[in-house]
Image (spheres, rainbow, N blue to C red):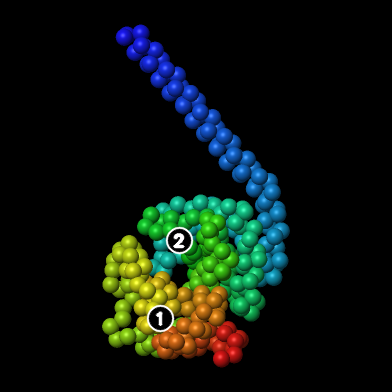
């Protein structure tokens, strides 16, 4: 009986050793693949090649493209009253180069919506990241209005339209920081009892749950074009820009059906026309 138990124990030990060896081999293979993958993209998409791909944009618009994570990502002084880029406590992961190489085309498509002078005047740089996590939420984008930097975050899951939409959102906020905006004509289009979610809740999770719990129709009826626009006035205005510049046909259908959206579009349009008269309804949405 003892011999059988010892034999069984030996078999179990050998099995565990083989399992451990297999796991070590698996880990080695995974690590090797990751290293080869990193080497491949670093060698295939070197800094020189990345910079050359962006050169038509950087030279035309006079902006800087930053994709290496460094202290320069953060505002050099203490946090100001107006947010200026990601908080210093944020965890930032660099953008994958296979994702980054898509962006010269994406940015050019986004920039084409504006006169060249508008981009030159209000944008100094675009900083890329694969992830920005401030401990409460992960960013899709943000901005530093003092240094005129737009941060674009893409972990590889965004399609071109989503990436373009993020730029228009952040650039609208940049314009808002540089120009006066009369809020009353905007909010006059809301129902009398309407409040932005950050006026109701104090925590990001509460705001997130509230905005994700509503339907598109709920938003449209209140003059809001996406549930993210429910959060603050600034996000509301910027979501109009995102949809108008990225999905004009979709926006036009919503506007034609919901009067409050139409009313806020006219206020939005007046704001953009003060920046440049090229922004007419026909230019943005085509003929009625």
Q: Which picture quadrant has residue 12?
A: top left
Q: Residues within 10 Å of mark 1 (few under 14, many from 20)?
A: some
**Circles 1, 2 touching at the beta carbon (< 8 Å):** no
* Residue on which the image places disc 1: 220
Task: State the residue in front, 130 or 26.
Answer: 26
Quarter of the figure with the C terminus: bottom right
Looking at the image, the residue that sits furthest to the bottom is 288
**Would you say 217 lies left or right of 200 here?**
right
Task: State the residue in front, 72 or 22.
Answer: 22
Helix, strand, or loop for circle 1?
helix
Residue 53, percent across and down?
70, 60
Residue 232, percent across and down?
38, 74
The residue at 64%/43% (across/down) is 39
Q: Does any portion of residue 271 appear in the rendered image?
A: no
The residue at 64%/58% (across/down) is 101
The residue at 36%/68% (across/down) is 212
Task: Give the number of marks.
Answer: 2
Q: Which picture quadrant has residue 82?
A: bottom left
The residue at 55%/56% (across/down) is 156
The label number, if any, that marks residue 139 in the structure image = 2
**Cα separation between marks 1 and 2:** 25 Å
**Vertical arrangement, residue 160 with respect to residue 19, above or below:** below
The label number, if any, that marks residue 138 in the structure image = none
């Amino acid at each position: 009986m003892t011999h059988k138990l010892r034999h069984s124990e030996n078999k179990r030990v050998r099995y565990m050793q083989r399992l451990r060896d297999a796991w070590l081999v698996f880990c080695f293979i995974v690590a090797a693949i990751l290293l080869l993958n990193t080497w491949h993209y670093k060698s295939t998409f070197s800094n020189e090649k990345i910079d050359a791909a962006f050169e038509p944009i950087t030279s035309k618009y006079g902006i800087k493209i930053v994709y290496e994570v460094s202290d320069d990502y953060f505002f050099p002084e203490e946090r100001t009253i107006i947010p200026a880029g990601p908080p210093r406590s944020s965890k930032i992961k660099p953008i994958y180069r296979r994702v980054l190489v898509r962006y010269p085309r994406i940015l050019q498509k986004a920039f084409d919506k504006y006169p060249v002078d508008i981009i030159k005047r209000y944008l100094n740089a675009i900083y890329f990241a694969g992830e920005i996590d401030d401990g409460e939420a992960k960013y899709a984008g943000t901005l530093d209005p003092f240094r005129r930097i737009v941060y674009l975050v893409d972990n590889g899951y965004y399609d071109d339209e989503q990436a373009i939409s993020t730029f228009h959102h952040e650039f609208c906020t940049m314009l808002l920081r540089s120009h006066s905006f009369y809020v009353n004509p905007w909010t006059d289009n809301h129902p009398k009892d309407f409040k932005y979610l950050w006026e109701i809740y104090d925590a990001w999770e509460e705001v997130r749950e509230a905005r994700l719990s509503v339907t598109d129709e709920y938003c449209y009826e209140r003059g809001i074009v996406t549930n993210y626009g429910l959060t603050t006035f600034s996000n509301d205005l910027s979501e109009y820009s995102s949809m108008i510049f990225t999905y004009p046909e979709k926006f036009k259908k919503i506007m034609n059906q919901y009067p409050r959206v139409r009313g806020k579009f006219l206020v939005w349009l007046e704001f953009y026309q003060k920046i440049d008269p090229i922004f007419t309804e026909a230019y943005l949405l085509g003929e009625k």
